[in-house]
Image: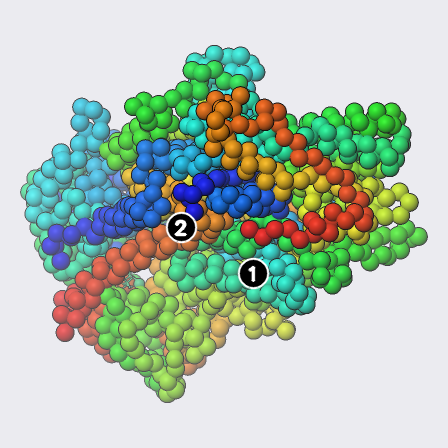
Amino acid sequence: DEESAGHYGMVVFLRGSEFFNWSYAGFQDAAATVGATTELQGPADWDASAEARAVDQLVAKGVDGIAVTAGDAETLVSSINAAMAAGVPTLTFDSDSPNSNRLLFVGTNNYNAGCAAGRAVAEMHGDNARVGVSLIPGLDSINARLAGFTECMQEMAPGAQIVAEVNDEGDLQRAETVNTAMLQANPEINVIFCSHGNPATGALAATRNVGRFDGPNKVDVMAWSIDVPILQGIEFDEYTATVAQNPYMMGVMSFFMLYSAANPTQFDSLSNPGFGHVPTADVDTGVAILRKGDPAIQAFLSPPQI
Amino acid sequence: MFKRPNSKNVSVSTIQYLGLSTIILAILFGCQIVFGNVLTEANMRVMAMNMVFEGIMALGMTYVIIMGGIDLSVASVFAFAEILVAKLMVQAGLPMGLAIPVTLLVCATIGAANGAMVVAFRVHPLIITLGMLLTLRGVNLAITDGRSVSGFSDSFIWLGQGRIFGVPFPILFFVAAAVVLGVLLAHQRYFRQLYFIGGSERAARFSGVNVERVKISTYVLSSFLAGCAGIMAAAAFGAAHWGHGNLAELRAIAAVAIGGADIMGGSGTIFGTVLGVIFLAVVHNAFVVSAVNPFWYDVVNGVMLLLAVLVSRLIAQSNTKKLLSIKQSKLESSF
Amino acid sequence: MLLKATNITKAFHGNVVLHGVDFDVRPGEVHALIGENGAGKSTLVNILSGNLVADAGEVSFDGKRVAFTHPLDAMQAGISVVHQELSLVPNATVAENIYLRREIRTASGLNDWSAMFEAASGIFDRMGVDIDPRALVGSLSIGMQQLVEVAKAIALNARLIFMDEPTSSLSEKEIRELFAVVRELRQQGMGVVFISHKLSELFEISDRITVLRDGRLVGTRDISDVSTDDVIAMMVGRSLDELYPVRSGHRGERVLKCTGLSRFGAVRDVTFEVHAGEILGVAGLIGSGRTEAMRALVGADPRLSGQFEIDGRTVEISSPADALDAGIVYVSEDRKQSGLFLSFDVAQNVSASVLGAEATFGFLGKKPILRRALDFIDRMDIRPRSAASRAIDLSGGNQQKVLLSKALATEPRVLIVDEPTRGVDIGAKALIHRRLRELAEAGIGVVIVSSEMPEVLGMADRVIVFRDGLVTANLDNHDGSLSAERVLKAAVQ
Amino acid sequence: MNADASVRHMARAPEWTQRIGRSREFWLLLINAGAIILLSALRPDTFFSWLNFKAVLGLMSYDLLLALAMTTVLIVRGLDLSVGSVLALTSVVIALLLQQGFPVFPSVAGGFVVAMLCGALNGVFVAKLGILPFLVTLAMLSAARGVATVLTTGQYISFPAAPYWFSTFARSEIGITVAGGYYGIPYLLLITLTVTVLYGILLSRWVPLRQLFFVGENPEAAKLAGLRVDRLIISAYLISAAFVFLAAVLMTSANRIGYANYGITAELRALAAAVIGGASLFGGSGSVLGTFLAVLLLAFIGNGFVLLGGDPNWQQATFGAVLILAVALDAIRTRRERG
Ligand SMILES: Nc1ncnc2c1ncn2[C@@H]1O[C@H](COP(=O)(O)OP(=O)(O)OP(=O)(O)O)[C@@H](O)[C@H]1O
Ligand SMILES: Nc1ncnc2c1ncn2[C@@H]1O[C@H](COP(=O)(O)OP(=O)(O)OP(=O)(O)O)[C@@H](O)[C@H]1O
Ligand SMILES: [Mg+2]
Ligand SMILES: [Mg+2]
């Protein structure tokens, strides 16, 4: 219990989304190995300020470490810094807050991930790849993914290009609306690249709406999600592929980073005196591009209940 | 018939305030005993900061609701103020001393627009302020492209994070505002008129109250306070973002309702609202310290709100019954 | 002369309600203003107090010519009104209501409550009543609220006070209190204009009396020169039988029997019968509990007890819907608040209670509804003759006709009409009376609740009188010989 | 807006035209037509295609159903802020039951029961306990969403084991060939439109629903006129819940997941649409056609935004602007009527 190995908190900006449940599961499992306890906090409605308050609350409550995924990089800076100043080791996972004093960032290196997706698209369509992107503007993570995607795609297939971007506000229904309109407006699009978790179902629906769900001029949907319906969709040949991050590993790594930061060894951390040792570089948990038949899909098909 | 009435309605609110206070204390000490780390300075500060912005909006909301209106637009004004002040300082490079007044002025203007439309169109304020909510939220999203704006000067940051005697500035602001607005509402003739308008617009007009002016100025006040909250929030979070304060308007209204104000207007006090705000803060904090599944939070909120309203309703009913029973006894004696 | 008004004329959308009325008040007198409902008393008061603007006529106050356009003007001049329907705010204290917008303030600009409480209790002492200035108005009885209104007027140190039916809902004791106050004011040289339907009161309190009839001045007399009969004669003028339809006088089977009807805090143990071919009049002062009794009867409000028989069959009534099924329909006294669907057209209003009737498989046909509407437009002579005009656009009289049509559309066994001609002009009034009589002749039990003595006497074959929620008399009037005095007697003491 | 037209047809021609001119549906229709013409002129290739219409209509289905729910309660002087969250709760329940391996019918029935329960609670608190609809449904808004989140811990609830037809029927289309052109109509759209038309007819003709207008216009008068006011109010909330339920079923099927964050702030859009369509918070008015046209207008605006490459962020703003504009025009119009 609390005393023995400490109590660690995880804060997310979309409480209970399947993705973060994976992370929390990893967080829990890792904690269990050393007999530490954990809790999950955060808003259900993507309000970064509420997330910041949650961090403050955990500090006030006196946890031994906090792993937070930044709904908005800047909004969390002061809370994270306050936590660190209060001696509570704090790191970011999945979505970074680079301007803060967080220990380090554990998660997908968005540029590399985007790059992998870009290559996959280039393999599929070569120079005639015409890509529409569904995104949420303003998230640095997504910008990085897009950069990686564009460069690596055009590196392999110089003719390939991104023809349109739409803002899905991270909402299923909106995603369907805007992607449908995007396909309307740009019939040449043959790939929709979902730059984050939510729009995939919407994007697929959009292809259905414009009658390019299957057949010769099917629009390939490249999802960025490991949600069960998406994975099933891949098995059904609906989605062409998905960029599978490794949220479980993010949770696991986050915990161990926090744990070692919270329990200093005989030499202090290089970058954060007073805390235990953690890597001075970010930790990339990597991605895999999953296509139909990939064994990993089966693994993901039974998400954790928390 | 002419014995002094032990003026019942007064007791309505007192009962409610006492009840609310006891519940609040119960939760606080309960959690302290069971989980600990509740009555610490740090947690108290966090708890307060957690609701302070909703609290400031709730103060203005109290005025509006007493007057028989409602203002759904506060949350979007809140975010708008955040963004505007940020853009003015960070992007337009205005000095803080200029950016803040400008922002507040704009917010006040929005309030004036709300009030003017409510008066002019004679539709339910819910609709007008809903329109304003949707419009502004869209504007917020559009002018920032969903990105957050940051990079404030330390002097500005102080407005959100600075402390005096260990108390964060926003909380001091809330307390000060509550005291001033409380006193005005209770003792200042202009604001007393809110009760008359909310109680019976007809009677108010009859007694020569300038209903239109009072209404408009009240919506101005509400937006102005939302603006202040927004500015301090931007400083507190060190960034302005359109998503901040999502659904805060509902939390503010809930606070007012839990505080015993009649949403139909005519009754309510700042003190009650403050209790309502504290209540919400404490409940929320209880969830964190107890680390129970935070998903239950919304459920409890809903139920609490309903209970609070039910209670005040029942008390009111028992009051009218008391009045009737006087007549009843008269009737029975007349045999 | 404190106030002198000459040739005051006023019309509401075409319906002239004051024809060149002259009226004056001396300082230190109580001047009674009296007349049937709709005679124009309140309208006159509203004009003299700046609440309405006259179409023609002159007003001088203190010898100076005045033209009030807003209540505030009159207030400043020193004229104040205790209105027929109270205008106080329940959630504010007595003192605050008295001093609204004329608050006593401290140096800091905040309200000086203690000073206001002081001043208020000062006024109450002057009035010789004991009301707590700190009490919320909402916690006071109607009577006490009435007195607060008076105090409000005094606080303005008005020199002329209009009291529009101040006693309408006061208990005897409260009325005594009020009269003491009025005498006190008279002593202090104030002018008081006192409106009331209760003759006995007027004779007790007033020095002069002015009678209005149908918006015309009948005359002004010193109270010492006239008797009750004179005044009633002046009020009613025309002999009743020329105005009211003749009665056949035959009394049929019993249609409705109401036994032991009681309602918490309002009505106690009311029992009466209604026979076919007979009109039952329900008399009483305003606030005597007639409406509450009738609403309780049809199940619109909860009741403590009461059994009902229709044509000898016992019926269970727990809601107006039940009442309708049983054949009892109640027509509210307040057509705007609880009578009409104002923004709906005449056709819909008339059919409101019988939507299901012509419906096939529950589906509404347009034709039957329209047909019914046109039918009633003829029967009740509703103007304009369009089924499509909205209720809100109709004049009061026509609204009343629509309201009645709505009730008749249900083809009831018993028709209870509350204040059926309140604020309705003579023509419409006569027509409504004719129709009601016809219904009675047609074997329907008709109950008329009315505050208008002439109406009660003119229409009813039998009269029950309410006082403070009790039936104090059950008087026969099949030959129209019943005298106003007997009814009034039962109604007041 | 006087909701009934029973007499208009009988009335003389000039008056008839007047009334048309006064009717809000008429103006909404014009505006919609204007929007269509404008868009087809600017983007003839993409906009004026069955594909696009199908998309626009299909996408507005959910909003339409929720707006109808809102219209119904507004008619009885009510308000239902909980449509969005009850939608989420219902879809979650259905999805969970399917996931547990229940057959489709019981699962959907389960969802129905839950939706009706919420509606009944709203109705009873409003009608019997006399608490303001705003507060009651505000509480429900919070509670229903909360329960949904608790049930799912916020996760997507997918139901791989569920019959294929259920997880596809909302999307699948029935094709009709008119004049050689093939038009595929998704069931989602078909069902929504059918329901809308039926409800439109019922609401204007069927007595029990007609009575709702009377209740809303003047509850006291309605009571004295022998209408069972409380029952009618409660049933209004039940009807509202039924529409929400339908939307939930379609959404669950269409997206193949139950999700606790469905329909966030949908209640605001629904309210806006209903009011633009002619409903009033003071009750007694509102029409299916009006609401439909309002939703359609808002959908076209949204669609146009993207087709014309306008910044989609401004969409929400226009939404609010349109609402305020509608209200303003109405105020002016009524003032002119009243003179
Ligand atoms: N605002 C109004 N609009 C139209 N008609 C009105 C209005 N106010 C009064 N009237 C009409 O003027 C006439 C006189 O009304 P008034 O209220 O002055 O009568 P009254 O003598 O006060 O009757 P009561 O004894 O019932 O108070 C009535 O026929 C009434 O219908
Ligand atoms: N004008 C009024 N102002 C305030 N209260 C009233 C008024 N009229 C009635 N009441 C209250 O309602 C109770 C019964 O009133 P009710 O209306 O049933 O009497 P009524 O004989 O029908 O008189 P009327 O219908 O002429 O007002 C009274 O005891 C009184 O307290
Ligand atoms: Mg009068
Ligand atoms: Mg009455």
Residue at 47% over, 33% down: A263
- Residue labelled with disc 2: B305
- Please tell me whether mark 2 sits on a helix, a strand or a loop: helix
Left or right side of D9 for B333: left
Task: Please provide percent x and percent y for residue C102.
Answer: 22, 32
Residue at 36% over, 26% down: B168
Left or right side of C352 for B283: left
Q: How is the image coloured?
A: rainbow
Task: Please provide percent x and percent y for residue D180.
Answer: 93, 52
Left or right side of B313 for A240: right
Residue D54 appearing in the image: no
Quarter of the rendering containing residue A91: top right
Residue nearest the viewer, comparing D332 with D167: D167
Name the amino acid type tagged 1.
Answer: Ala
Quarter of the rendering containing residue A2: top left
Chain letter, disc 2 residue = B
Task: Please provide percent x and percent y for residue D130.
Answer: 40, 58
Residue nearest the viewer, comparing B167 with A59: A59
Residue at 59% over, 59% down: D93
Q: Quadrant of ligand 2?
A: bottom left
Q: Quadrant of the N terminus of chain B?
A: bottom left
Q: Most extreme residue toward the front, as rendered?
A: A266
Residue nearest the viewer, comparing C74 with B152: B152
| Marker disc for residue D115 | 1
Residue at 83% over, 26% down: A154
Q: Dot 1, how many residues are within 10 Å of its Cα: few (below 14), some (14-19), or many (20+)?
A: many
Task: Please provide percent x and percent y for residue C305.
Answer: 28, 76
- Please tell me whether mark 1 sits on a helix, a strand or a loop: helix
User: Spatial distance from mark 1 to mark 2, Cα to Cα?
Assistant: 21 Å
Q: Dot 2, how many residues are within 10 Å of its Cα: few (below 14), some (14-19), or many (20+)?
A: many
Q: How many marks?
A: 2
